[in-house]
Amino acid sequence: MTTTTAAAPARRGKAMDSLTQRYLVLIGLIVIASVGFGIANDNFYSLANIGILLRSIAVLFLVSMGMTFIMLTGGIDLSVGSNVAFAGGVGVIALTATDSALVGFAAAVLAGMAIGAINGVFIGRLRLSAFMVTLATFALARGLALVIYDADSINVFNGAFLWLGGQSWGNMPVVIPFVALVFVALSVLLYRSPFGRDVYAAGSNFNTAFVLGRMPQRTLVWVYVLSGALAGLSAIITVGRVSSGQPWTGLYLEFDAITAVILGGTSLFGGRGRLLGTILGVLLYGIIINGLVLTGTNPYLQNLIKGLILLGVVLLDTLVQRRKAQ
Amino acid sequence: MNFKTGLMSATALTLMGAPAVAQDDTLDIVFINDGHVAPYHVAWLKGFEDAIDAYDEAFPDTKITGRWLSAEGSLEKMIQQTEVTINEGPDVMFVNAINVDAFEPLVAKAQEAGITWIAVHSPMDSADYSFTLGDVVNGTNQGLAMCALSGGEPYKVAIMLGQAGNPSGEARREGILKGIGACDNIEVVAEQPADWDTVKAQSIAENWLTQFEDLDAISGVTDAYMYPSIAIATNSGKDLDFYGYDGDIPILQQMQNGTVKADILLSGTREGWNFVQMAYRIHEGETPDKVYDFFTPLVMTEENHKTALDNGFPEDVEVYYVDEALDVAAKGYLEFGPDSVK
C-alpha cells in the first residue's frame, strides 16, 4: 500500500481534477436519485422525511469521516462498528454509576479512543496489517460490549445524555448541526494543519514520509485514535436515538462507512481523497436507503442496488484514472 | 348541482359501480422484521403476502395492502426503516424488534400518528398489542418430549441457542432447560449461540460431533439449525436425535423417517396468515388480547407420542401428528384465512 511516490504539486492538481469529476458524478447521482424517489413518493421531500434521513446518516457521517482519515493513510478500520457498541456500553455504565452525563460522555469517547489506540499502536508502531489488526479488534470490541452489557440492553433516562441523539428542533435533529461542526473541525485539521499533511504523506509513501522526518508511524497511531474518538461520539448519538445502550448496535457499520468513503473517491491505497467526497458518498448512500424503503422496493433488491451503484462508481473511477494515465 | 352535472355524476357512479365507494376503506399493513436469514422467514413472508392478497380479494369493501421490510440484523437500519414507515402512516405495524428497549421511543411516535403497533415475539408493555409465541411453554414441551423419548437411559444433548440477549431465544432456552429438568438422565454437554444463522450452526454442529463422540441429541431454538446439523450427522454416519423449533415443513417431513423426534409448530406460513387476520380483526373493531399468543402445538409422530405418554409425558400438552401439522403448516388459510373472520 506504499508503492506510489509522494504527490508532487503538479500531480496533486491532476488528482484534484479527477476528484472534482467524482464529486460531480456523485452530485449528479444525488440529484437523479432525489428526483426519482420524489416522483415515486411525494413524502420523500417532506420535512419530516428529510429530518429522518439526516438523523439516520448522522452516525455514518461521523464514522465515515474517521474512516476517511484512516484510508488516506492506506489503512482500514473494521472495528469501528463494534467500537460504537463498546464505547456506548462504557459510557452508559459510567453514566449509571455516577449519574453525570459529562462523565458518561467522557467515558464513551475515551473508551472509543482506547480501542483506536490499540489499533494504532499495532498498525503504526508494530507495522502489522491494518486489516488483520482491526479484524481482531472488531471481534474484541464486540465481545467486550456483550460482556459489559451482559448481552442485554440498558435503558437510559438521563435527559442530558440523550439530548444529542434524541432531540430535534422541529424536524431538524440537533445532531445535524453537531455533525456539521465536527466536519468543519476535521476539515481544518486535515487541510490546515501539519497533522493533515502528515496524513497525506503517510498514505502517499510511508517510507518517504519517514525519511523526511514526518514520523508516519506516529501519524498512524493518531488517525486510529481519532477514528476511535469519533466512534465514541457516534455511540453517544446512538444511545440518545434509542434511549438505551445496545450491545448489538453498529453491526455492519464499518462496511457502510467503507462503502461511503470509496464512493466519495478516497483511494483504497491512500494519499488521495477529501472529506467532501465522503460527505457526498454518505448522502447518496442515505438517500438510496431512504428512497428504497419509501418506494417499497423489495428488500432483497436493496442490497443488489447498493452493490451495483458501488461497482458502477468504482468502475467509472477506474476508467477515468486509466484515461488520464494514457 | 344542475341537471347536467347530476346526470353525469349518476352515470359515472353507475359505470364505476359500488366498488369505487367501497374502496374508500383501506387497511395498510407493514411488517418490519429483524432479518431474513432462515427458511422460516421465507415461509413467513410468503404467508403474509398470500394472506394480503386473499383478504383483499375476499373483502372488496376494504382495500387491503401490505409490505415487509428486513433490517438484516442491523439495529440502525431497523430504526431507520421504522421511522420512515411511521412517516408514511400505515394502519398497522408488526415489528419484530432486534431489542424492544431500543424501539420504545418509536412506539410512542407511531401511536401519536394513529398507527397500531404490534410487537412481534418479544412483548412490549407500551405496544398496542404483542404477538407472542409462548416460548417458555413451547421450550418446556420440547424438553419434556426429550425426557419422555430418551427412555430413562443416560442421554447427552447439546443445545444451540439464539443470539445472546434476544428475549425470544432466551425464553426458548429457559423452557427447554425447564423441560429437561423434569428427568435426571439427560446431561446438557454444551450450549452455544448460533445467532439464528444456519452457517454458524454448521460449524458448531461439526465441532460438537468431533468433541462429543457419544452425543445422543441436538436441540435447537430454531429449525434453521436442524438443516446443517442433520446433514452433518448423516454425512458422518452418526445416529443422532434432533429436537427442533419452528415447524419448518422440510424438518417436519424428516420426522417421518425418525430423525427429528419433536418440533414446535409455529410455521412461518401460518404466522404470516395470522398477522393479516389479526390486523383485519383490529381494523373491524375487534380487540384481541393485548398479549396475543400464537397457537403453537408440539409435533410428534403418533408412535412417538404413544411412547412418550407411556413414559410419563403430560397428557394435556396438545400434540399434532405429522400429517396434520404438515397440512396446516403449508396452508395458513385453513386456520387464519378470510373464512376465519367472516
Image: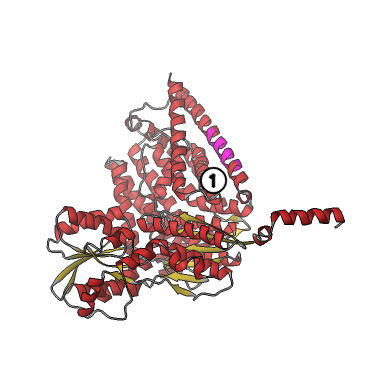
Instruction: Give how far across and how far down residue B289 sits, in percent.
Output: 49, 76
Q: Name the side, left or right, on which A277 lies relative to B44.
A: right
Where A315 sits versus A143, above or below? Answer: above
Q: Is residue B195 magenta?
A: no
In this rendering, the count of numbered labels is 1
Instruction: Give how far across and how far down residue B16 sits, in percent.
Output: 70, 54
Viewer-side residue, B298 vs A121: B298
Q: Name the side, left or right, on which B250 lies relative to B215.
A: right
Please state the extent of the stretch shown in magenta in the rendering: A25-35
Instruction: Give how far across and how far down residue A277 sits, in percent.
Output: 50, 38
Q: Name the side, left or right, on which A78 lies relative to B204.
A: right
Q: Is residue A32 magenta?
A: yes
Instruction: Give how far across and how far down residue A84 sits, in percent.
Output: 40, 55
Residue at left offset 33%, top offset 45%:
A120
Q: Would you identify the image quadrant in which residue B83 lies?
A: bottom right
Which amino acid type corresponds to the residue marked 1 in the rendered image? Ile
Residue at the limit of the structure toward the top, as seen here: A326
The residue where tag 1 is placed is A287
Where B167 sits versus A168, above or below? Answer: below
Q: Would you identify the image quadrant in which residue A271 lies?
A: top left
Viewer-side residue, A190 vs A245: A245
Viewer-side residue, B100 vs A221: B100
Structural crowding at the residue carrying mark 1, measured as other residues with C-alpha within 10 Å and reported as few (<14), some (14–19) or many (≥20)? many
Q: Name the side, left or right, on which B108 lies relative to B308.
A: right
Where A171 sits versus B270, above or below? Answer: above
Viewer-side residue, A301 vs A271: A301
Q: Does any portion of residue A243 appear in the rendered image?
A: no
